[in-house]
């Protein structure tokens, strides 16, 4: 099975084009203003307009207002919404765009119950739990905490890089993977060599 790849935390057009050139299926924009990877919606709009066809554009939000989601998604022209905070299913479902929901995994997480709660989402993104940080930590979590059969497509995130992606794919067998810090020079600035190495790792992982 082909594993889809999202490169998140994009702030520059050149990084988006490099990610797509190496085979990324989706590009993520962070619209949480406390993040070092925050991007102005008008900048994201210019990036989206320069992308080739069939690339999914994803807006990442942390406990936003509904007005902020509607405004930014319209300005940018998003395809998908990613909620990374404490948004409830009713809030997530009110928009015209499909959404995926992030869960920060810790030892006592009941991911089957969580997936059931957000059953109308298009996927469940699993990230590392770090107190007070909603995402983008660059840390992995214990992949054996993931149930063998989730009722939603699984998107694996959290500390992935070229060195561990093959092992992660072998152990988890995710529908998709999501990377940000693992392909960066610094927060929000991507590295072409790291993106290329990560994508090679994904394709090698598909063969395991």
Image: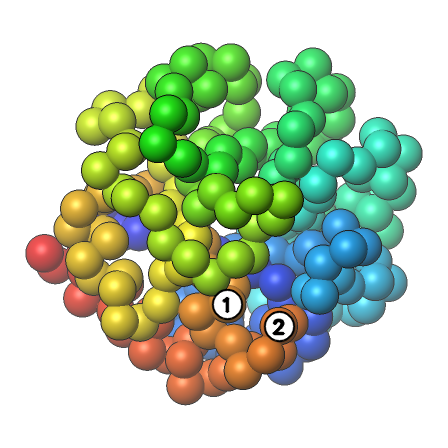
Whole-angstrom CA distance, mark 1 to mark 2, is 7 Å
Tell me which numbered mark, 1 or 2, is placed earlier along the sequence: 1
Q: Can residue 14 be seen in this snapshot?
A: yes
Horizontal side, residue 2 vs residue 102: left or right: left
Q: Mark 2 — residue? A: 187
Q: Quadrant of the C terminus?
A: bottom left
- Where residue 6 appears, x then y in whole percent? 48, 56
Q: Residue at x 51, y 13 (%)?
A: 117
Which picture quadrant has residue 36?
bottom right
Instruction: Determine whether the residue tagged by mark 2 lies in a helix, strand or loop.
Output: loop
Horizontal side, residue 39 vs residue 148: left or right: right
Q: Residue at x 46, y 73 (%)?
A: 183
Q: Residue at x 31, y 51 (%)?
A: 3
Horizontal side, residue 81 vs residue 167: left or right: right
- Where residue 120 appears, x then y in whole percent? 54, 18
- Circle 2 packing at 10 Å, graded few (<14), some (14-19), many (20+), is some
- The extreme front residue here reads 131
Q: Mark 1 — residue? A: 181
Above/below status of 202 relative to 21: above
- Where residue 147 appears, x then y in whole percent? 26, 27
Which picture quadrant has residue 15?
bottom right
Instruction: Determine whether the residue tagged by mark 1 lies in a helix, strand or loop.
Output: helix
- Where residue 142 appears, x then y in whole percent? 29, 44
Q: Can residue 27 be seen in this snapshot?
A: no
Circles 1 and 2: CB atoms closer than 8 Å: yes
Which label was assigned to residue 57? none
């Amino acid at each position: 099975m082909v594993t889809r790849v999202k490169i998140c935390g994009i702030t520059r057009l050149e990084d988006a084009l490099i990610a797509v050139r190496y085979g990324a299926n989706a590009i993520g924009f962070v619209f949480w203003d406390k993040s070092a990877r925050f991007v102005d919606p008008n900048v994201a709009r210019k990036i989206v307009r320069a992308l080739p066809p069939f690339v999914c554009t994803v807006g990442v939000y942390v406990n936003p207002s509904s007005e902020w989601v509607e405004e930014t998604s319209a300005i940018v022209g998003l395809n998908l919404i990613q909620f990374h905070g404490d948004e409830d299913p009713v809030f997530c479902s009110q928009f015209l765009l499909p959404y995926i929901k992030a869960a920060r995994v810790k030892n006592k997480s009941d991911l089957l119950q969580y997936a059931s709660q957000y059953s109308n989402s298009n996927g469940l993104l699993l990230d590392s739990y770090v107190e007070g940080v909603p995402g983008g930590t660059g840390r992995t979590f214990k992949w054996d905490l993931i149930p063998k059969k989730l009722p939603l497509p699984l998107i694996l995130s959290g500390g992935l890089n070229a060195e561990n992606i093959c092992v992660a794919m072998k152990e988890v067998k995710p529908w998709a993977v999501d990377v940000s810090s693992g392909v960066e020079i610094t927060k929000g600035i991507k590295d072409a060599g790291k993106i290329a190495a990560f994508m090679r790792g994904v394709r090698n992982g598909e063969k395991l």
